[in-house]
Amino acid sequence: MSKFNRFEDLDIWKIAVSIAVDVYLLCDTEPLKSDWSMKDQMRRAACSMSDTIAEGFEYNNNPDFIRYLAYAKGSSGEFRNKLVILNKAGKLDDQIYQELYAKSIEFSSKTKSLIDYLKKFEGDKKKK
């Protein structure tokens, strides 16, 4: 894996930003537009993924970054849970649900892979 100098170069950050933008646009339409509480929660969960990656990356050390990646992955789970609730309540179109759900799964999977890689890297450093 190559070294990244900016969080903006990370694929997981790009996916998270894409999700957040999609959610912001979605929340400007009904029925979410009128549901202030859920709209706020959806935006917060979606934005938290990219925010947390950016914050953790800027600490410039792998142990902190790993911890923040785990938080970002947790936010993805929270976000997916809200998607499921909205879809089952008939407040979210199936196609939009499936697209956002798939992006969130991709984010979680790639974030887990990066966490595993960084943990292995840190473990290998300790062995030397």
Image: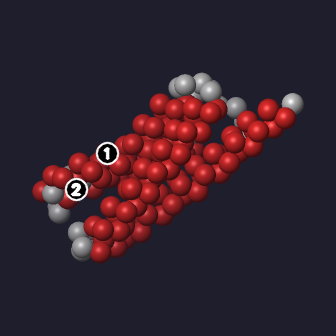
The residue positioned 53% from the left and 55% from the top of the image is: 108
Report the amino acid beneath label 2: Met
- Residue 112 pos. (x, y %): 60, 52
Q: Residue most toward the left?
A: 34
- Assign the C terminus to one quadrant of the image: top right
| Residue visible at 57% across and 34% down in the picture | 65
User: In the image, is residue 41 above or below residue 3?
Assistant: below
Disc 1 marks which amino acid?
Answer: Arg
Horizontal relation, residue 94 to residue 122: left or right: left
Image position, residue 98 (x, y; %): 41, 69
The kind of secondary structure element at disc 1 is helix
**What's the residue at 48%, 45% (across, down)?**
72
Q: Which residue lies most toward the front here? A: 127
Query: What number is the disc on residue 38?
Result: 2
Residue at 35% across, 68% down: 84
Quick one: label 2, few (<14), some, or many (20+) residues within 10 Å? some
Mark identifier at residue 44? 1
* Res 21 visible: no
